[in-house]
Amino acid sequence: EIVLTQSPGTLSLSPGERATLSCRASQIVTRDSLAWYQQKPGQAPRLLIYGASSRATGIPDRFSGSGSGTDFTLTINRLEPEDFAVYYCQQYGSSAMFAFGQGTKLEIK
Amino acid sequence: QVQLVESGGGVVQPGRSLRLSCAASEFTFSTYAIHWVRQAPGKGLEWVAVISYDGDKQYYADSVKGRFTSSRDNSKNTLYLQLNNLRAEDTAVYYCAKSMRGNYWDAFDIWGQGTMVTVSS
């Protein structure tokens, strides 16, 4: 079973800054089957990135994903007020397990 | 628009059962695997189960295996999750989520709004 560890737990930044969120897997994530989701309070998660680096439909290009193997990164350029939320990574590659990371809270500084 | 709507949540005593439903609209429901994901109050996301597009295969998280059963009725565009022998630790918002391109092994591109299950005596 793959365990995903996200860091930092909380990230405090100001609008206009760049956010860099990390997701590390305990085993290699096959076929870069890694997704990122955004969740705001009281809402369902929203898919941002799939395949480690492909943006989902309607996601602004200030969101980008990178990485492979066991280390993945979500970068958000020029933070907008609506970007402050909790972000989860998830692997969906194999073994019928779809583990999520524990989440990174992006808060306004 | 493409939508999933959960229902059936509520307050239930430990050891009792509950059935959740997830109604789909505006996509070809019968060609997509659908997942269940839950979120305990103030906690992160936990994958619970997936069912294949035709209902023939299901996989479950270890925490619910043997107690929860997923099924679907493609003629009604509806997914079900039967929750048996409920425990306090099953208290959570339960979401259904659509597999992006149909296969299990894919990201979840459409989520319902969730339904709350509270297990308490």
Image: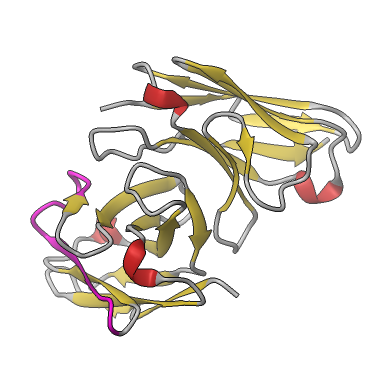
In this picture, residue A44 sits left or right of residue A83: left
Magenta stretch in the rendered image:
B60-75
Where the N terminus of chain B falls, by quadrant? bottom right
In this picture, residue B107 sits left or right of residue A74: left
In the image, residue A49 sits, relative to residue A46, either above or below, namely above
Query: Quarter of the image holding residue B11?
Result: bottom left
Residue located 55% across and 29% down the image: A52
In this picture, residue B78 sits left or right of residue A59: left
Residue located 87% across and 29% down the image: A17
Frontmost residue, B101 versus A11: B101
Q: Residue furthest right?
A: A16
In the image, residue B6 sits, relative to residue A20, either above or below, namely below
Where the C terminus of chain B falls, by quadrant? bottom left
- Residue A18 place in picture, x, y as percent: 82, 27
Residue located 36% across and 60% down the image: B32
- Residue A10 place in picture, x, y as percent: 64, 31
Frontmost residue, A87 versus B112: B112
In the image, residue A61 sits, relative to residue B82, either above or below, namely above
In this picture, residue A51 sits left or right of residue B73: right
Magenta segment includes B31: no
Total count of labels:
0
Residue located 60% across and 40% down the image: A87
Frontmost residue, B3 versus A17: B3
Q: How is the image coloured?
A: secondary structure
- Residue A5 place in picture, x, y as percent: 46, 24
Q: Residue furthest left?
A: B66
